[in-house]
Amino acid sequence: MADLNKLGLAEARDALRKGDVTSAELTGACLTAIEGAGALNAFVHHTGDLAMDQAKAADARIKSGDAPAMCGLPIGIKDLFCTKGVPSQAASRILEGFVPEYESTVSQNLLDSGAVMLGKLNMDEFAMGSSNETSVYGNAVNPWRRSGDETALTPGGSSGGSAAAVAADLCLAATGTDTGGSIRQPAAFTGTVGIKPTYGRCSRWGVVAFASSLDQAGPMTKTVRDAAIMLGAMAGYDAKDSTSAELAVPDFEAALTGDIRGKKIGIPREYRIDGIPAGIDKLWQDGIAMLRDAGAEIVDISLPHTKYALPAYYVIAPAEASSNLARYDGVRYGHRAKLDHGDGITEMYEKTRAEGFGAEVQRRVMVGTYVLSAGFYDAYYNRARKVRTLIKKDFEDAFAAGIDSILTPTTPSAAFGLGEMTDADPVAMYLNDVFTVTVNLAGLPGIALPTGISDNGLPLGLQLIGRPWEEADLLSTAYALEQAAGFVAKPQKWW
Amino acid sequence: MSIDESTAARVAKLARIKVEPDALPALAQEFNNILGFIEQLNEVDVDGVEPMTSVTPQVLKKREDVVRDGDQQAKVLANAPDAREGFFAVPKVVE
């Protein structure tokens, strides 16, 4: 078989089980592709030797008749996941040299399921960013380019390396994490599929924490079926994460009927925001028509507090980040600043954190510190948490009225150029998450999938939002939309 | 609400991040832009609304109060920038 790295999870799994291919061959093809893709800067820690060992073990398992869901399938892991014996830096200078003594639950679940880890993937520092430009490793680059234009584009963020790697066929799939849109926005920018499951579906244990009440891990894949397979392998109750849900994990792949006749799909009027490009609106209207043609009932709905989701997020997420990132003090792990004669422990903290954190992380830690400080806690933090209650209630009301899932654009634009937003106000960058952040605040599952191409040749994605814990139903609806959209475009190789 | 340089300096101090004095004006301006964006929340009527504590309705689990882990000193110290004789080493804390 040619171009084994171009396979998806389902195809590769079936070929492995039939004996048409070995995991060592699949893994070798991916390692070769990674070697030739330095220009994308997607893989930042390479574990080729480990991968080949895992592949051989997987081949032995398959031969012995023991082939769990991910057995022998080579994937990339976002640098936010702690991986035992392999550098795990959250793309930050402050975790330079950090090599975990333990494995995150999600990556362990994947390894237990037979997955092969090719290496660690680029991302925004501590997952704070929408363009992968805050990484200590430098920018990850989108394999897609505008038609007739060589401008380097962002793969989105924060899971930019994951998205670029999957889109460029450097791996069969990758893990991502999503706090405000960090799986779904990069998926949309790279023509790939990404699902953020319900809060609590995947364990957060061993995932470097950004905003703990919002963070969720999820798969980034080439197809909806692949997302169903990989989510099943990642998810599950974990006693080490107190917010992990003690619920059985359904067989997501078996639920992919694609039969959405009679399903009620909500179209939230508040997502028709001013200044949205005509191409995005057309994509949305086309998606509505596809679901209607597949037998769904389209219902106009209102989510009245949508407008306040981003400002609430930019209180809650920095507040939690300022608390979570207090642990980076130069004492227990990672970077410690060189001290001057006479410097005490406070100078050590202050110099270490000034050197170790990049500008965006410093900004968010300080904003979080401010909104939690005496005198402002009620005005900012408590008010934002009340608004969050209202945002969640908007969705609860829609679901109580019989809505099964909600269709929106994933992003307000196609991928933009690296550096294009450098001089912009940070708030302008934050607007990337305008359609995705509500889902994190409400703890709901959301999936992004490619359904069209922009006028200048870039992939565009739609988002489906589901009821809590009903990822199986959500994936099936996404599967129907995927079938109808028939998106098969791939980036032309220039790297 | 407008943040001046002294407030920016105080926040940096609370966050334990060293900010050079000449960087304070730009930092204060950035805070003001972000807080200006956040101010929109004041338009929302939140009377009688409970602040969210948990996004999924769940009760934190309890476990028996027994030691289940430990004896991992070498692993705990393995990544320390400065570890000596089984301890984390830090600059002088008390004069």
Image: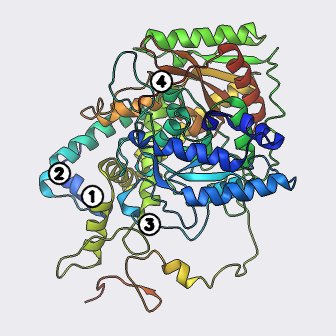
Report, in whole angstroms, how far the alpha carbon at label 2 lies from the one at label 3.
24 Å
Q: Is residue B80 left or right of residue B91?
A: right
The residue labelled by disc 1 is B12
Measured along the vertical axis of the image, is residue A269 above or below residue A195?
above
Could you tell me if the residues under marks 1 and 2 are in contact, i.e. CB atoms within 8 Å?
Answer: yes
Asked if labels 3 and 4 share a chain, the reply is yes
Q: Nearer the viewer, residue A82 or A167?
A: A167
The residue labelled by disc 2 is B24
Report, in whole angstroms, how far the alpha carbon at label 3 lies from the one at label 4.
43 Å
Q: Nearer the viewer, residue A142 or A239?
A: A142
Which chain is mark 1 on?
B
Q: In which quarter of the image is the C terminus of chain A?
A: top left
Which chain is mark 4 on?
A
Q: Nearer the viewer, residue A160 or A29?
A: A29
Q: Position of residue B1 (x, y in %)?
A: 27, 41
Question: In this orientation, does residue A212 appear?
Answer: no
Q: In this view, does A51 lie to the left or right of A42?
A: right
The residue labelled by disc 3 is A327
> Which label lies toward us, 4 or 1?
4
Asked if labels 2 and 3 share a chain, the reply is no
Q: Which mark is residue A492?
A: 4
Q: What residue type is labelled 1?
A: Ala
> Which label lies toward us, 3 or 4?
4
- Residue drawn 45% across and 41% down? A36
Q: Which amino acid does label 2 sit on?
A: Leu
Label 3 vs 4, first from the N-terminus = 3
